[in-house]
Image: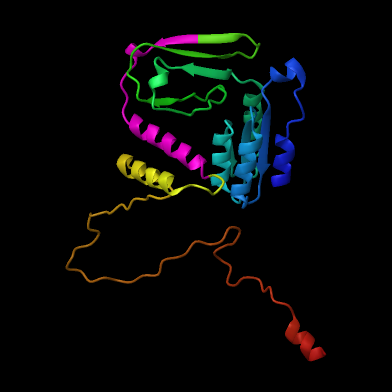
Amino acid sequence: MASALDAALEMTGDGGEESRARVRQVVFITDGAVGNESALFGKIRDGLGSSRLFTVGIGSAPNMHFMREAARYGRGTYTAISDLSDVARPLDELFGKMEAPVLTDIAVSWPGQAAATEAFPDRIGDLFRGEPMVQVVRGLPAEGALDVSGRLPDGSQWQQSLNLEQAANGKGLHRHWAKQKIDSLMDSGLTGKIDDDARQHVIRLGLEHQLMTKYTSFLAQDKTPSRPTQEALETDSVPTLLPAGSQGTMLRYPQTATMSPLLIAIG
C-alpha cells in the first residue's frame, strides 16, 4: 500500500495554469487489511498537498478506522462496500460525485474570526451534491455576517453572505464541536506520536461531553430485573458466532495437517 500511495500522491510538477485550475483527486481502493497505519498516515500528511483523498473499502477485511480517518484527513469521503455482488453501484455514485463537485476551493470568513478560539474543520473539503458542508466554531457570538465563497464547476466564483443574527438555536452542538476538537488532537497522533498533554485533553473532552474516544468508554447498566429475585439461577448453553463462510451443519473443520505419520511409516 505504501509504494502505491507514494506513486499516487507524488507531484509531477506545476503543470501550468490549466493544471492549477483543476481539483486533483486520489482514490484508495482495497479489499485487504491495512496494517501499517502510522506509516501511511505519515505519507498522506507529507504528500497530500492540495489533493483530495477518497477511500473505498470492499468486503469485511479492510481496516475501517484507517479508511475513515484517511478520507477525513484527505478532505474526501469514505465508501464502504460490504455486498460483493453490488460493487458497481456505490462506485458509480462515488465517481459521479467526484466528476461534478458542486463547489470547490471553499473559504469561510466568520465575523471577528481573529478572536475565535477554534474552527473545525480547519481545512474545508469540497461540496458534493447530497452531502452537506459542516463547520463548527466556538468562541464567537452569533452576530454579524458570515461570508462563504467557492468556485463553481464552470470556473466562476460563488459567494454568499448569511446574517448570523437570524440563525436558529440548536441542541447538541457542544458534542459536535468536542468531537471535531478530539479529531484534531488525534490527527497529531495519526503517525503514532501523540503526547501526554494531548491525551489528557482528549480524556477531559470525552468525559465532559460524554463522548467515546480512544481513551474513554462508557458502561451501560440495565437495572430492570429480568427474573423475580426469589427464583434460583439457571444455566444454559449460549451458541457462539460461526466464522464467516461456515455453516451450522458443519461437524468438524477440514484437517490442515500433513500426512507426516503415513510418510514416516512408509519410510
Magenta region includes residue 264: no
Residue 11, relative to residue 64: is it above or below? Answer: above
Residue 117, relative to residue 253: is it above or below? Answer: above
Residue 7, quarter of the rendered image: top right
Given residues 159 and 15, the one toward you in this image is 15
Given residues 97 and 90, the one toward you in this image is 97
Work out which quarter of the rendered image holds the C terminus and state it: bottom right
User: Where does the magenta region start and end?
Assistant: 160-189
Left or right: where 6 falls relative to 206: right
Q: Which residue is drawn at 75% across and 80% down?
A: 259
Q: Which residue is drawn at 63% across and 33% down?
A: 53
Q: Position of residue 56 (x, y in %)?
A: 62, 39
Magenta region includes residue 175: yes
Residue 101, relative to residue 203: is it above or below? Answer: above
Q: Where is residue 90 in the image (x, y as percent from the top left)?
A: 62, 34
Residue 144, quarter of the rendered image: top left
Left or right: where 223 falls relative to 47: left
Q: Which residue is drawn at 56% across and 66% down?
A: 249
